[in-house]
């Protein structure tokens, strides 16, 4: 399909973060999800206070009723509501709003890569970088074994999930970034796999974990939100084979688009900290897409400014500790 058709399918598909099962999962994690018209918003408590911050991720612009969002936010004692990457391209802007909308700090990357899953295998392989095809065959030749789990009740699934969590922690320590607590991933996989919306895919060398990903599926789209690899086995190229098997899974599930979930805004900027995984994703022939910018709907201006100052201090402190 053309890039225009690819984007049309992707943006017309309700994002998984706007799905009811995702709201159920977040509520189980202690972050209440509420409906605001068609859209879904989660409520995040501000520590040491009775206030909250609303978060409305990846909703279609047509589903964003600012008046209702403001009313629900005020009723729930929210300081503000973050509208993080409305589900459309970078050209979108709210027009003639009577509400206070200001640029906000994004939660997710504001660019992504989309891969056309309607192509056949030969077309997909020919669209890859030559080195990527070589690494894929190298992983197969070296005996990298891939296993996909669709339920925590499958034999070996619980062990595989704990291995994913362990690898996630190790990678976070090595690269000095933050990850969710362990029970987040366990609950996420339990809730979403029950709805046939989550898959755990792992690559092994003999009996050792080499790479592990969690994938989501919702509607016509397969998502790649979480994935780590074992640095010790990098020469086996396990992630290349995982990507290929993930593509095959998406095709088997009749998905039309694979959202590789996050990229640098400029794929050619080697100074960007996300350049490494951006280069990996683009090597599979995916299309780079810039999304609309995050904005905050301010409900209490004084507390909003105070909260942002506190949040900046908190992140500086966390980075020093890390």
Image (tube, rainbow, N blue to C red):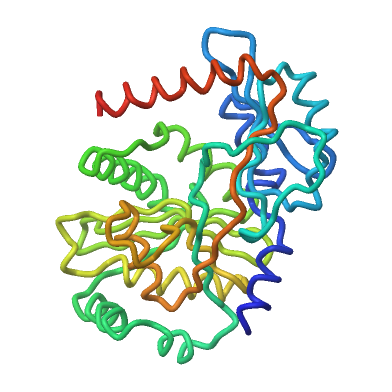
- Residue at 33 percent across and 25 percent down: it is 316
Q: Is residue 196 above or below residue 38?
A: below
User: From the image, which quarter does the N terminus lie in?
Assistant: bottom right
Q: Is residue 114 left or right of residue 165?
A: right
Q: Is residue 301 above or below residue 257?
A: above
Point out residue 288 in the picture as x, y percentages from the top left corner.
49, 69
Foreground residue, 95 or 10? 95
- Residue at 56 percent across and 29 percent down: it is 29
Point out residue 229 in the picture as x, y percentages from the top left corner.
27, 56
Point out residue 212 in the picture as x, y percentages from the top left corner.
35, 55
| Number of numbered discs visible in the structure rendering | 0
Name which quarter of the figure residue 27 lies in: top right
Q: Is residue 256 left or right of residue 128?
A: right
- Residue at 72 percent across and 16 percent down: it is 77
Foreground residue, 243 or 183? 243
Of all residues, the one furthest to the front in this rendering is 96
Residue 173 appears anywhere in the view:
yes
Residue 254 appears anywhere in the view:
no
- Residue at 83 percent across and 41 percent down: it is 65
Point out residue 239 in the picture as x, y percentages from the top left corner.
31, 65
Name which quarter of the figure residue 165 lies in: top left
Name which quarter of the figure residue 211 lies in: bottom left
User: From the image, which quarter does the C terminus lie in?
Assistant: top left
């Amino acid at each position: 399909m053309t890039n225009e058709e690819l984007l049309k399918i992707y943006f017309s598909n309700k994002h998984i973060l706007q799905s009811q099962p995702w709201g159920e999962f977040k509520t189980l994690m202690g972050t209440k999800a509420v409906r605001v018209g068609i859209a879904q918003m989660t409520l995040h408590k501000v520590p040491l206070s009775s206030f909250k911050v609303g978060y409305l991720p990846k909703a279609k612009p047509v589903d964003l009723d600012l008046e209702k969002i403001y009313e629900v936010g005020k009723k729930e004692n929210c300081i503000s509501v973050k509208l993080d990457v409305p589900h459309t391209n970078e050209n979108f802007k709210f027009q003639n709003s009577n509400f206070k909308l200001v640029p906000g700090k994004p939660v997710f990357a504001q660019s992504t890569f989309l891969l056309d899953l309607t192509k056949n295998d030969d077309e997909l392989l020919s669209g890859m970088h030559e080195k990527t095809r070589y690494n894929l065959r190298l992983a197969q030749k070296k005996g990298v074994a891939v296993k996909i789990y669709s339920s925590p009740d499958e034999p070996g699934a619980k062990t595989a999930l704990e291995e994913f969590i362990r690898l996630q922690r190790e990678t976070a320590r090595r690269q000095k970034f933050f990850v969710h607590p362990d029970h987040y991933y366990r609950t996420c996989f339990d809730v979403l796999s029950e709805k046939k919306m989550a898959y755990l895919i792992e690559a092994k060398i003999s009996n050792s974990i080499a790479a592990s990903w969690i994938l989501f599926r919702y509607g016509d789209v397969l998502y790649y939100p979480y994935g780590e690899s074992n640095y010790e086995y990098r020469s086996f190229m396990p992630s290349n084979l995982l990507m290929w098997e993930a593509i095959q899974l998406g095709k088997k599930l009749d998905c039309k688009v694979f959202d590789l979930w996050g990229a640098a805004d400029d794929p050619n900027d080697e100074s960007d900290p996300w350049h490494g995984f951006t280069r990996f994703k683009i090597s599979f022939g995916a299309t780079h897409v810039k999304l609309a910018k995050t904005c905050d709907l301010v409900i209490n201006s004084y507390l909003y400014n105070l909260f942002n100052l506190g949040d900046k201090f908190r992140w500086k402190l966390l980075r020093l500790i890390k």
